[in-house]
Amino acid sequence: MIEIDDIHNIDADSVRSLAKNIYGTEISENLLELLLQKCLGNPFYTEQMVLYLKESGSTVTKNKKPLRELHLITAGTIESLYSDEPEKHYSDLAYHFEKAELKPESKKYLYFAGNYSSENYRNEEAINYYTKLYDYCDSEPEQAKVLRFIGEIYIRLGDWKNTESIFKKKLQKSP
């Protein structure tokens, strides 16, 4: 039986070996370094990160973009760990999916983060999320909807100059 005292922090060679056994190939040195930093030597967390990479079909071999992959892992981990209270982590999920360059997930969580911030009267935060979401919109009706959200926040703030500007822009986008 394994005792808690027998479990030690994982070193670079062990991470490299673990990843190679799971993934079937060598991982990049950049990813190795990031795994060591982010996993804080925890062998179980390291294993889960590498497994998630493999299951998501991510490419982590040498000369690839490991940072994008780690953001994807982090977002997936947050989704799994906090599935009972996702609203408290919408902003983190939006951030990590944006950094992983996954447009559908980025849109989804920017929308959720904007709504959550707006509902909790974090107005500037909500405007920032909605402004980022605007850049992900695929159509003018989507853009008009996001502009309405921003305009409603400016109304709440009593910022009539920005309200007018946003609603004029929205009218140009509306079908």
Image: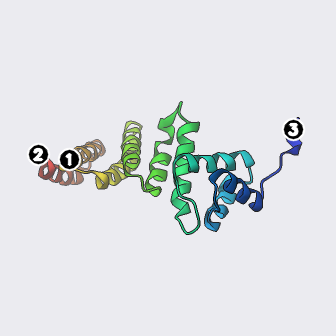
The residue wearing badge 2 is 175
Q: Of 68 and 116, which appears nearest the observer?
A: 68
Q: Residue 70: x percent and y percent?
A: 56, 55
Q: Residue at x 30, y 44 (%)?
A: 153
Mark 1 or mark 2: whose residue is earlier in sequence:
1
Check if mark 1's residue and mark 2's residue have beta carbons within 8 Å: yes
Q: Residue at x 21, y 50 (%)?
A: 139
Which of discs 1 and 3 lies nearer the camera? The answer is: 3
Mark 3 or mark 2: whose residue is earlier in sequence:
3
Mark 3 crowd level (few <14, some 14–19, many ≥20, 10 Å Cα): few
Amino acid type for the residue under numbered disc 3: Ile
The residue wearing badge 3 is 2
The residue wearing badge 1 is 144
- Badge 3 marks a residue whose secondary structure is loop
Q: Residue at x 41, y 38 (%)?
A: 116
Q: In this picture, is 141 found above or below 71?
A: above
Q: Residue 62: x percent and y percent?
A: 59, 67
Amino acid type for the residue under numbered disc 1: Ala
